[in-house]
């Protein structure tokens, strides 16, 4: 369905399109939300939402620790690539460049941003910028809040009491949307491959239930992991797994820092939670070099990387007041990154390619 054209609604005059097509145009089309110049949108897309990267420089420090783990696990290769997929404006890589400047590791690091938006002004020259994931012989591929922005179609299980051949109760259909108003209407039945994905991932979708169809994300993640020669691929996102799929969908919008109804007109971010286990399974199924997979909460992943949120000892306040205040502020930022019900409840998925899961995360393995 995803590549189909507009569907005429039979007379009302508006064009209804599948959600994936509408989202693709709204986020990445000409003048799309993520790709239009920041001069047309003060603060860029980041003015509309807050990711862990924006929340605190502690995230970059934790990722540096992860880079060190991967480096060690790969036997300190001459060249280690850190590839940030869906890099936004390159904030994470810029922080890593600064943290490793002048170090032995920094001299071996190659920092690459993969992003559909243009390279921002003022980014350090050391950071390469491109729209495609190039092969990484040795490295860490990291994707924070990328997959939730990979456009997907939405299916709804009819609950109209009818059961005719066009689809009544129990028959999933694509939802179509009017990009100007956000109004929805049921469209055609699913293609066999989307129907198979839905049946496998949402076996208990109730009548009237809806689900975002994750095949494009399974494929995007599998392709990303396939680019790794040896190393670790990590994705962090709003996500769910088979034991807790949301039965009524998660598609939503963000505008000016507020959650809003999803309107695919380019005025807001459009995001839907990621079926993380499906992505990991797809990559492992299609890539025999994936040796280990794990998923866990951001809270657990970051705590293992040294982000604690513990307040500094009160005694520091008198011996080093400035240091105390700095440590207190860092503790507050750490607490935000690992907060249950907030960023800490994001899920991290990790897949090791031709290496072990780093020792520090092995206790998190299922
Ligand atoms: C929510 S932002 C996250 C930015 C950054 N990683 C952060 O955590 O702040 C998602 C980004 O992914 C980018 N993106 C989405 N699909 C992409 C693709 N297929 N290739 C490269 N970038 C993509 C978007 O342009 C957007 O900048």
Image (cartoon, grey):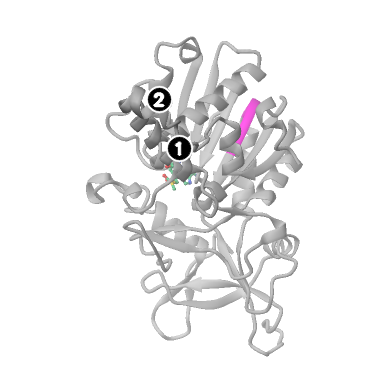
Relative placement, left or right, of 73 versus 179 is right
Few, some or many residues within 10 Å of mark 2 (<14, 14–19, 20+): some
Ligand 1 is found in the corner quadrant, namely: top left
Task: Residue 318: tell me if it is visible.
Answer: yes
Q: Which mark is residue 30?
A: none
Label 2 sits on a secondary structure element that is strand
| Residue highlighted by disc 2 | 127
Taking the image as drawn, is residue 113 in sight? no
Q: Does label 1 point to a residue whose CB lies under 8 Å from ligand 1?
A: yes
Q: Residues within 10 Å of mark 1 (few under 14, many from 20)?
A: some
Image quadrant of residue 129? top left
Residue 126 vs 267, above or below: the answer is: above
Q: Where is mark 1, residue-wise?
A: 131
Where is residue 178 shown, x and y percent of the image?
A: 42, 73
Image coords of residue 69 (percent x, y)? 61, 22
Q: Residue furthest bottom?
A: 161
């Amino acid at each position: 369905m995803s590549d189909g054209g507009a569907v005429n609604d039979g007379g009302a005059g508006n064009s209804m399109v599948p959600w994936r097509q509408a989202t693709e145009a709204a986020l990445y089309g000409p003048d799309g939300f993520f790709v239009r110049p920041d001069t047309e949108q003060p603060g860029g897309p980041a003015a509309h939402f807050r990711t862990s990267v924006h929340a605190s420089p502690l995230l970059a420090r934790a990722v540096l620790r992860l880079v060190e783990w991967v480096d060690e696990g790969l036997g300190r290769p001459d060249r280690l690539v850190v590839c940030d997929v869906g890099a936004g404006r390159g904030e994470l890589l810029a922080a890593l460049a600064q943290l490793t400047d002048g170090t032995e590791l920094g001299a071996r690091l190659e920092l690459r941003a993969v992003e559909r938006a243009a390279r921002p002004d003022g980014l350090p020259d050391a950071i390469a910028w491109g729209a495609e994931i190039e092969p990484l012989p040795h490295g860490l591929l990291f994707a924070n809040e990328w997959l939730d922005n990979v456009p997907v179609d939405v299916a709804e299980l009819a609950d109209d009491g009818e059961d005719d051949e066009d689809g009544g109760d129990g028959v999933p259909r694509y939802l179509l949307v009017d990009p100007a108003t956000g109004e929805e209407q049921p469209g055609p039945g699913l293609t066999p491959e989307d129907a198979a994905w839905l049946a496998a991932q949402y076996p208990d979708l109730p009548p009237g239930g809806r689900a975002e169809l994750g095949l494009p994300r399974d494929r995007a993640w599998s392709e990303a992991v396939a680019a790794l020669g040896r190393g670790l691929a990590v994705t962090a996102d709003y996500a769910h797994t088979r034991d807790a799929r949301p039965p009524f969908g998660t598609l939503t919008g963000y505008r000016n820092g507020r959650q809003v109804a999803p309107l695919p007109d380019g005025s807001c971010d459009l995001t839907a939670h990621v079926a993380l286990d499906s992505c990991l399974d797809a990559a492992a199924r299609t890539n025999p070099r994936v040796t280990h997979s794990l998923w866990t909460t951001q809270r657990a992943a970051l705590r293992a990387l040294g982000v604690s949120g513990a307040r500094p000892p009160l005694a520091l306040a008198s011996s080093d007041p400035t240091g105390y205040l700095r440590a207190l502020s860092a503790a507050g930022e750490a607490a935000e990154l690992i907060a249950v019900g907030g960023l800490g409840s994001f899920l991290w998925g990790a897949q090791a390619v031709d290496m072990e899961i780093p020792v520090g995360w092995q206790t998190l393995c299922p």
